[in-house]
Image (cartoon, grey):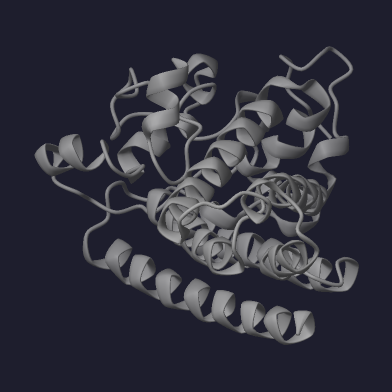
Amino acid sequence: MTETIFNAETTIRLAGFFGIFLIVAVWEMVAARRPLHYSKAVRWYSNLGITTINGLLLQLIFPILAVSMAAMGQERSWGLFNNFSVPFWLAFVLSLLILDFVIYLQHLMFHQVPALWLLHRMHHTDLDYDVTTGSRFHPIEIILSMLIKFSAIVVIGPAPFAVLIFEIVLNATAMFNHGNIRIPVRFDRYLRWFVVTPDMHRVHHSIHLEETNSNYGFNVPWWDRLMGTYTAQPRDGHDEMTIGIEIFRDKKYLHLARLLLLPFLISKDGPSKKIDR
């Protein structure tokens, strides 16, 4: 049973990934928000290469993924919603919100804990910002993220269907809010009350530290507003803002091999100095 769910989860997630990727990629070509400044071929090769490595690594390391873990928890009565009588619709909505809050807290933690930031900063060293940036994460971070997700599922006890929907939505919104897509400012002003928009999340990729340490949400924007980590607009404006991290401005850090080494590159003069390796 669990193996069947695992296979279905993999197929559905891959179909969702490629479908949303195609939509956002075409949107970027039709209505780009900003001009790209660096080689798209190099960036896409590296970012999609990392994505492929991460997918294969998860399949290799973990015998099951998130939806299968939820199914196992349901069979063994793990977690809150598997031990208390709650209407399905309420458990479904609460599961999505709690899982999303866990992802928000995880993202915050990967910025604030120095050892975790060494892993997560790879996501921020992209010098442009488009749909492929949304899946640019170091393999070690992906493994840790899966372990955190497993822990949350064991505690919460969400239905497998809720976890499947959450995974699909999380992948979709990650690609959407990293998209180099133009949304009318007036519409964006209202849309960002319900979902994290590209203009909202782009602030998080600013070279300015106070902006990087804000707008952590991926799905819904409410956690940033409630937790005081919301920044409405970049101080340099979306057209003029600089994407990335100050110590990783060299184009060599866009290449796949360098991405894998990034967590281990530490400046002798401290984190504020340029690494010249």
Q: Residue at x 38, y 22 (%)?
A: 225
Q: Residue at x 82, y 38 (%)?
A: 263
| Residue 253 drawn above or below residue 275 | below
| Residue 44 drawn above or below residue 154 | below
Say whether residue 200 is left or right of residue 2: left
Q: Position of residue 229 (x, y in %)?
A: 46, 19
Front one among 207 and 1:
1
Question: Would residue 229 be seen by someone viewing this image from the given angle?
Answer: no
Q: Position of residue 243 (x, y in %)?
A: 48, 35
Q: Residue at x 41, y 58 (%)?
A: 89
Question: Would residue 223 be seen by someone viewing this image from the given angle?
Answer: yes
Say whether residue 94 is left or right of residue 146: left
> Which quadrant of the view contains residue 251?
top right
Q: Position of residue 218 (x, y in %)?
A: 47, 44
How many labels sit on residues?
0
Q: Position of residue 13 (x, y in %)?
A: 57, 74
Front one among 99 and 196:
99
Q: Residue furthest front?
A: 85
Q: Residue at x 55, y 34 (%)?
A: 244
Which corner quadrant holds the C terminus? top right
